[in-house]
């Protein structure tokens, strides 16, 4: 069995931050081949160099340092050949001394280390310290096979890349409150969004009347007010499912809704296209007499199913049909990610807990919130009742050191 370990770490702030990508493994394996190739295949601006603590004193295992950013001047070269080279090499030697790298492997392994040095970095001491710390941390992570899969699954929907500044929200921790922006007034929708409290439990829906008046691209306008929110395009698609999913995707929606009364073929095409482009395909069972039979007739699986009592039928005492949630979940039992069930129609704080007890994952609320004189308070009337942590994690911080297990 060939030893092959991968580590990564980013540390520091500003121009002197360090980002290390690292491979470590046998001289006779793929890492050894990459090590040798790097030393003999030189490229302008990215010339690999051996890591040395000082000239004539390399660490063991030997390491080769590859600059990620093009070296364009003697000043750039001095940062790589000086503090970065020394800091990375010292980290390797210390890792051996601390037992992070097994001492019996120092003559069998080599390390390939990609190093980021910002062109505007100027503080030599910070360059040294940050690259030392990032290299040492990446070695610890490599030896611990970091990150564990549980951490990846938990953090993938919470994380935001510091450079891209974009987070792709997913519905990973129900129950949620979905705010239906059903009024055709764009200014009213924007006002509601501005008054929303910050919460991981809020979903925003561009309602059908709003989309009919302004087009599906209205979501682009709404997202300016809530860049990281999960946005649903309530298209209530009846035909040409693929076309309407693509419209929602191009408008930067995270999900699109098809009507459950549409032909099965249209819904299947809708759901297949939603899965292809990576957004949620939702089916609204408004006016569907037998939702279970409808779902059994579909070849594709929805990500969310809405049990919907229409606004015009609320006053007639139409049933909520929340008892079907258990049947729907049983129909898709064991499937990952799990199918979520949403409920809509007359949801109020006084009955939202009943919906949750019936295993509803999403509470869809429109007029109670959007027509309120105090939008934030109306939203908190629901958020404060939803089980589990409701608001943005105030204790979230940017470090992963505690997740590294020392071998």
Image (cartoon, grey):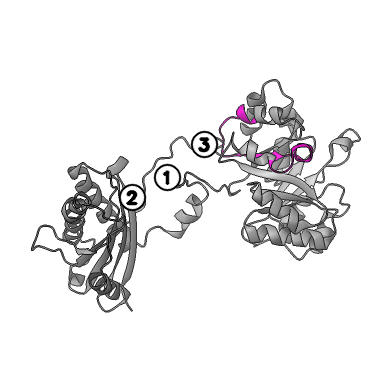
Percent position of residue 269, x then y: 75, 62
Q: CA distance from mark 3 to mark 2?
A: 24 Å
| Helix, strand or loop at mark 1 | loop
Q: Nearer the viewer, residue 262 or 49?
A: 49
Percent position of residue 272, x then y: 71, 62
| Residue 110 drawn above or below residue 349 | below
| Helix, strand or loop at mark 2 | strand
In the image, taking residue 167 as reference, residue 80 lies left or right, namely left
Asked if the stretch drawn in magenta spans residue 230, the answer is no
Task: Kindly identify the residue that appears in the image at 66 percent across and 51 percent down.
Answer: 249
Callouts 1 and 2 close, C-beta under 8 Å: yes
The residue pinned by badge 2 equals 10
Residue stretch rendered in magenta on the structure: 193-217
The residue pinned by badge 1 equals 162
Task: Kindly identify the residue that appears in the image at 42 percent across and 46 percent down.
Answer: 163
Foreground tag (3 vs 2): 2
Q: CA distance from mark 3 to mark 1?
A: 18 Å
Q: Earlier in the sequence, mark 1 or mark 2?
A: 2
Q: Nearer the viewer, residue 344 or 112?
A: 112
| Residue 137 drawn above or below residue 360 | below
* Residue 406 visible, this orientation: no
Percent position of residue 375, x then y: 66, 25
Using the rendered view, name the quadrant where residue 103 is placed. bottom left
The residue pinned by badge 3 equals 392
Percent position of residue 395, x then y: 43, 37
Pointer 1 local density, CA inside 10 Å: few below 14, some 14–19, many at least 20: few
- Quadrant of the drawing holding the C terminus: bottom left
Q: Nearer the viewer, residue 329 or 308?
A: 308
């Amino acid at each position: 069995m060939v030893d092959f370990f991968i580590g990564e770490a980013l540390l520091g702030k500003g121009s002197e931050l360090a980002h290390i990508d690292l491979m470590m493994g046998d001289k006779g394996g793929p890492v050894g081949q990459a090590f040798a190739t790097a030393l003999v295949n030189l490229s302008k601006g990215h010339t690999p160099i051996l890591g040395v603590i000082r000239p004539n004193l390399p660490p063991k295992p030997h390491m080769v340092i590859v600059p990620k950013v093009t070296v364009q001047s003697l000043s750039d070269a001095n940062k790589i050949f000086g503090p970065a080279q020394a800091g990375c090499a010292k980290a390797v030697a210390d890792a051996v001394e601390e037992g992070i790298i097994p001492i019996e492997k120092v003559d069998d392994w080599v390390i390939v280390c990609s190093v980021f040095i910002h062109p505007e970095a100027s503080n030599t001491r910070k360059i040294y310290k940050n690259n030392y710390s990032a290299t040492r941390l990446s070695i610890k992570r490599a030896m611990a096979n970091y990150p564990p899969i549980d951490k990846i699954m938990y953090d993938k929907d919470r994380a935001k890349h510091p450079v891209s500044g974009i987070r792709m929200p997913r519905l990973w921790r129900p129950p949620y409150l979905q705010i239906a922006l059903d009024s055709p007034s764009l200014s009213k929708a924007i006002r509601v969004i501005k008054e929303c409290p910050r919460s991981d439990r809020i979903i925003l829906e561009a309602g059908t009347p709003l989309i009919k008046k302004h087009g599906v691209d209205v979501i682009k306008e709404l997202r300016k007010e809530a860049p990281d929110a999960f946005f649903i395009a309530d298209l209530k698609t009846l035909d040409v499912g693929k076309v309407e999913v693509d419209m929602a995707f191009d408008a930067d929606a995270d999900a699109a809704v098809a009507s459950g009364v549409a032909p099965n073929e249209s819904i299947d095409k809708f759901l297949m296209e939603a899965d292809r482009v990576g957004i949620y395909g939702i089916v609204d069972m408004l006016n569907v007499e037998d939702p279970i039979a409808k779902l059994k007739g579909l070849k594709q699986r929805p990500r969310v199913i809405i049990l919907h009592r229409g606004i015009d039928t609320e006053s007639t005492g139409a049933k909520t049909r929340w008892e079907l949630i258990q049947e729907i979940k049983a129909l898709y039992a064991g499937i990952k990610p799990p199918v979520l069930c949403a409920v809509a129609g007359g949801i109020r704080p006084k009955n939202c807990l009943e919906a949750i007890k019936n295993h509803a994952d999403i509470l869809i609320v429109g007029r109670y919130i959007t027509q309120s004189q105090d939008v934030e308070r109306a939203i908190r009337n629901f958020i404060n009742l939803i089980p589990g942590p409701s608001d943005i994690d105030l204790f979230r911080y940017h470090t992963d050191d505690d997740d590294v297990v020392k071998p």
